[in-house]
Image: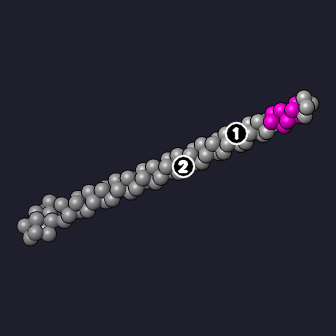
Amino acid sequence: MTARAAKRKIAEGEALSPDKKTKLQTDENNQVLNKTKLQTDVNKQVLNKTKLQTDVKKQVLTKTELQTDKNKQVLTKTKLQTDENKEGTS
C-alpha cells in the first residue's frame, strides 16, 4: 500500500493497522495463557509426583507395621519359653 493510499484509508476510517496490532496482542495473550496452562499441567505432574511420594511413605509405614508384628511374634516366643521354664520348675 502506498503512503497516499494509506492516508486515504486513514481519512476514511479504514486504517486496519491498530486492529491488526490489537489482534496480534490478543494472540500473544492467548499464547501466554496457553503457556500458563502448560505450567499448570507441570504443577499437576508435580502434585502427582508428590502423591506418589506419599504412597511410598505409606509403604514405609506398612513395612514398619510388619516389623511391629515381628516384634509381637518375638514376644510370643519369649512367653512360650517362660511357660516351658514354669513346667521345668514344677
* Identity, as a three-letter code, of the amino acid under mark 2: Lys
Q: Quadrant of the C terminus?
A: top right
Separation (CA) of disc 1 from disc 2: 26 Å
Q: Is 56 left or right of 40, judged from the image as shown?
A: right
* Identity, as a three-letter code, of the amino acid under mark 1: Thr
Q: 37 or 70: nearer the eye?
A: 70
Residue at left offset 67%, top offset 39% = 64
Report the residue marked by disc 1.
Answer: 68
Within the magenta stretch, is there residue 82?
yes
Where is residue 87 drawn, in percent x and y? 90, 34
Say which element carries label 2.
Answer: helix
CB within 8 Å, label 1 to label 2:
no
Q: Which mark is residue 51?
A: 2
Where is residue 44 drawn, in percent x and y? 47, 52
- Answer yes or no: is residue 41 visible: yes
Within the magenta stretch, is there residue 32?
no
- Answer yes or no: is residue 49 visible: no
Q: 57 or 69: nearer the eye?
A: 69
Vertical position of residue 38 compared to residue 6: above or below: above
How packed mark 2 is, by other alpha carbons closer than 10 Å (few <14, some 14-19, many 20 or more), is: few
Where is residue 61 drawn, in percent x and y? 63, 42
Where is residue 22 drawn, in percent x and y? 22, 60
Q: Which residue range is magenta in the image? A: 78-86
How packed mark 1 is, by other alpha carbons closer than 10 Å (few <14, some 14-19, many 20 or more), is: few
